């Protein structure tokens, strides 16, 4: 018996009625970038089904170099596999979702950040960069960071949103107009 035991039982239930799907373009043509917080599960909050949208998650839902590299690879893969099937030559929209009450918000406090750096061995600057104190501010910064990356495919658009833990509502901060 481990902590995984009840989850494995749930998986057994799931697998009983499961039908596998072929690899295809994500049905929603959206990639979600969001926080790893267990209160912000995109499948539940956005009603995503299997095959709808790839989801990239890290602390804060920040646009890090690793996130940019994943998006660049997904764009390349989608273009290679499904480029000919696209009606309007657009691959997908990246929806960056930051949220209120984010646990990374504590890192905005210098003494907490210093303690965290000492305890984990992570550089203080990296911890500061991951902090989401005001999601409306950080999501705008991250949309800009992704849009200005030379690795971003011109066939990809970017939008920014804030999820409110208190209400369950997602608000769009920056829409994703195509150039
Ligand atoms: Zn968070």
Image (tube, rainbow, N blue to C red):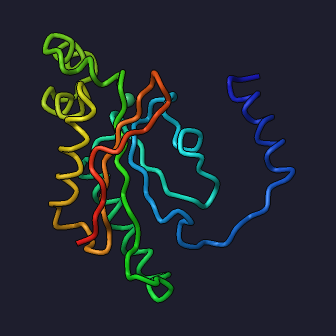
Q: Horizontal and vertical percent for residue 164?
A: 41, 29
Furthest toward the right, the residue is 16
At 36% from the left edge and 67% from the top edge, which residue is drawn?
Answer: 73
Tell me the quadrant of ligand 1: top left
| Residue 144: percent from left, percent from top | 17, 52
**Quadrant showing the N terminus:** top right
Image check: 110 left or right of 157?
Answer: left
Give the left or right position of residue 19, taking residue 64 as reference. right
Question: Residue at 43% of width from left, 38% of height from top?
Answer: 170
**Furthest residue in direction bottom, as rendered:** 84
In the rendering, at what x and y percent does residue 11 appear? 76, 41
Q: From what the image shows, is residue 15 above or below residue 135?
A: below
- Please give the count of numbered marks on the rendered protein: 0
Is 35 displayed left or right of 117 in the figure? right
- Image location of residue 143, percent across then percent down: 23, 51
Q: Vertical placement of 39 versus 96: above or below?
A: above
Figure check: 119 above or below 131: above
17 sits to left or right of 46: right
């Amino acid at each position: 018996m481990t902590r995984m035991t009840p989850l494995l039982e749930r998986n057994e239930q799931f697998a009983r009625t499961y039908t596998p799907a072929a690899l295809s373009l994500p049905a929603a043509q959206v990639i979600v970038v969001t926080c790893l917080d267990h209160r912000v599960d995109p499948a539940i909050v956005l009603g995503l089904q299997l095959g709808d949208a790839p989801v990239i998650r890290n602390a804060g839902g920040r646009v890090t170099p690793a996130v940019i590299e994943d998006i660049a690879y997904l764009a390349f893969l989608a273009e290679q596999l499904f480029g000919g099937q696209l009606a309007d030559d657009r691959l997908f929209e990246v929806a960056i979702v930051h949220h209120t009450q984010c646990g990374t918000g504590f890192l905005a406090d210098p003494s907490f950040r210093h303690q965290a750096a000492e305890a984990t061995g992570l550089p203080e600057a990296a911890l500061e960069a991951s902090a989401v104190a005001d999601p409306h501010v950080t999501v705008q910064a991250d949309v800009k960071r992704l849009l200005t990356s030379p690795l971003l495919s011109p066939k990809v658009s970017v939008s920014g949103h804030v999820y409110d833990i208190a209400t369950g509502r997602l608000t769009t901060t920056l829409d994703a107009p195509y150039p």
